[in-house]
Image (cartoon, helix red, strand yellow):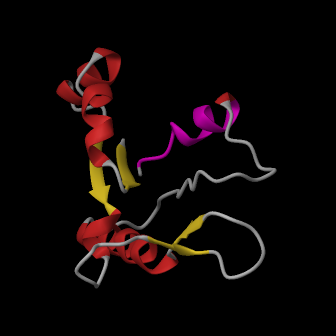
Amino acid sequence: MNIFIHTIFPELFNCFLNTSLIKKAQEKNLLNIQLINIRDFCTHKQKQVDDKIYWWGAGMLLKAKPIIDSIEYVIKQNNLKNFKIIYLAPSKNIFNQQKAFEYSKEEN
């Protein structure tokens, strides 16, 4: 199974990916995990991936363009045809163990 993790903090995953069952699965080539830094797909010098919210409320919002560009890059570079995209965000749709089990049968 190939997993591509798009993140603005790839260094946070190194400890997790280099220990325990995840490491063993990668060593046995059962699992291939690649970290994609969304900041690499920003067009300006500062590599800023967030912006102000344009309507009511405080906080910041991730820009769509760098995320979309990073996903399109992975699809093109790996010639992906069948794949699932899991976008973790606050919503009513909950990613649970049942969905994880279903997705574990996918190649990408």
Q: Residue at x 40, y 69 (%)?
A: 71
Work out whether residue 66 or residue 82 is closer to the camera in this orientation and state it: 66
Relative to residue 6, is residue 21 depicted above or below? above
| Residue furthest right as drawn | 92
Q: Magenta: predominant secondary structure element?
A: helix
Work out whether residue 30 or residue 91 is closer to the camera in this orientation and state it: 91
Q: Which residues are magenta?
A: 98-107
Q: Residue at x 29, y 42 (%)?
A: 33
Q: Quadrant of residue 20?
A: top left
| Residue furthest top as drawn | 20
Q: Residue at x 26, y 65 (%)?
A: 78
Q: Quadrant of residue 24?
A: top left
Work out whether residue 108 or residue 54 is closer to the camera in this orientation and state it: 54
Measuring from the top left, give residue 32's x and y in whole percent.
27, 41
Relative to residue 91, is residue 33 depicted above or below? above
Q: Is residue 82 left or right of residue 93?
A: left
Measuring from the top left, give residue 84's x and y in whole percent.
53, 56
| Residue furthest front as drawn | 58
| Residue furthest left as drawn | 27
Measuring from the top left, give residue 102's x and y in whole percent.
62, 38
Q: Does the magenta-highlighted stretch encompass residue 44?
A: no
Check the picture and name the quadrant holding the N terminus: top left
Work out whether residue 75 or residue 50 is closer to the camera in this orientation and state it: 50
The mark total stands at 0
Relative to residue 97, is residue 92 depicted above or below? below
Q: Residue at x 25, y 23 (%)?
A: 23
Measuring from the top left, give residue 83's x and y in whole percent.
47, 59
